[in-house]
Amino acid sequence: MKRNLKIYEEKWWRKNRYFIAGIDEAGRGPVAGPVVSAAVIFSDTVNIDGIDDSKKLSPEKREELYQKIMEDALAVGIAYTDNVVIDKINILQATYLSMKRALVRLKIVPDVILVDGYPIPNISIEQESIIKGDSKSFSIAAASIVAKVHRDRIMEFYGMEYPDYDFQTNKGYATPKHIEIILKQGPCEIHRKTFTPVKEIIEKIFGERS
């Protein structure tokens, strides 16, 4: 039986709250690179087959759906917070910051925000938080795809800038090979210095030099 991913949107549409923005992030877990957030608003007539939590989709399917979302959405906002700010204010606050920036970049002010996980603090727009919303809401799932594709493209660019770190493959996640590279090379400019195991590697390097 096909899931209805528009249950949350339909609830608000029935209340005449037309502009519903789904918002999600990509990149909270990696030890390198930015956290990226996307906000997406659709009209109630849009249907895109295959929309789902980005983690359940292949890279090729995400790219295909990304193009459809960008073509069919009423508005899309994309923003990121880089590793320097993440290290200064922590990943949770950096995620909220990227989400707020993504909302500002929408060309339409939302009536309601559907957010994956927990509410975004200190915003005036009404919001509904949905645990595992990227697998329950059409708009949030679309936002998860946009954020993931955009972040992967950023990491592929960094892969060319820092070729020793294999960012095209690991996307900044702490794979065994990535950790091995950091141990040999030390962290680069885009590594999150406060994240375990990067922090431990830095402490080990400086400990050996002292």
Image: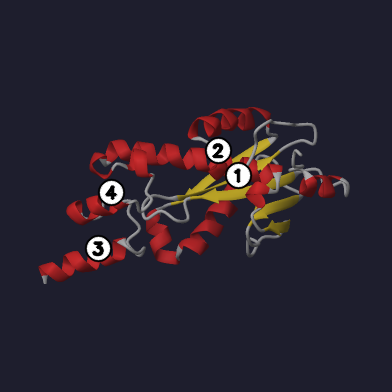
- The first of marks 3 and 4 along the sequence is 4
Residue 121, numbered circle:
none
Classify residue 68 by image quadrant: top right
Q: Is the residue marked by circle 3 packed among few (<14), some (14-19), or many (20+) residues within 10 Å? A: some
Classify residue 200 by image quadrant: bottom left
- The first of marks 1 and 4 along the sequence is 1
- The first of marks 2 and 4 along the sequence is 2
Question: With respect to residue 75, does 67 lie above or below?
Answer: above
How many marks do you count on the picture?
4
Quadrant assignment for the N terminus? top right
Q: Hey, what amino acid is under mark 3?
A: Ile
Q: Hey, what amino acid is under mark 1?
A: Asp
Q: Hey, what amino acid is under mark 2?
A: Leu
Residue receiving disc 2: 57
Residue receiving disc 4: 177
- Please say if the residues under marks 2 and 1 sit with CB atoms less than 8 Å apart: yes
Q: Name the secondary structure under disc 1.
A: loop
- Please say if the residues under marks 1 and 3 sit with CB atoms less than 8 Å apart: no
**Alpha carbons under labels 1 and 4: distance apart:** 27 Å
**Alpha carbons under labels 1 and 3: distance apart:** 33 Å
Q: Nearer the viewer, mark 1 or mark 3?
A: 1
Residue 201, numbered circle:
3
- State the residue lying farthest toward the front: 1
Q: Is the residue marked by circle 2 packed among few (<14), some (14-19), or many (20+) residues within 10 Å? A: some
Q: Which one is nearer the viewer's eye here, 205 or 17?
A: 205
Q: Hey, what amino acid is under mark 4?
A: Lys
Residue receiving disc 1: 53
Q: How far across and down, in percent of the image, does residue 64 sit?
A: 56, 28
- The first of marks 1 and 3 along the sequence is 1
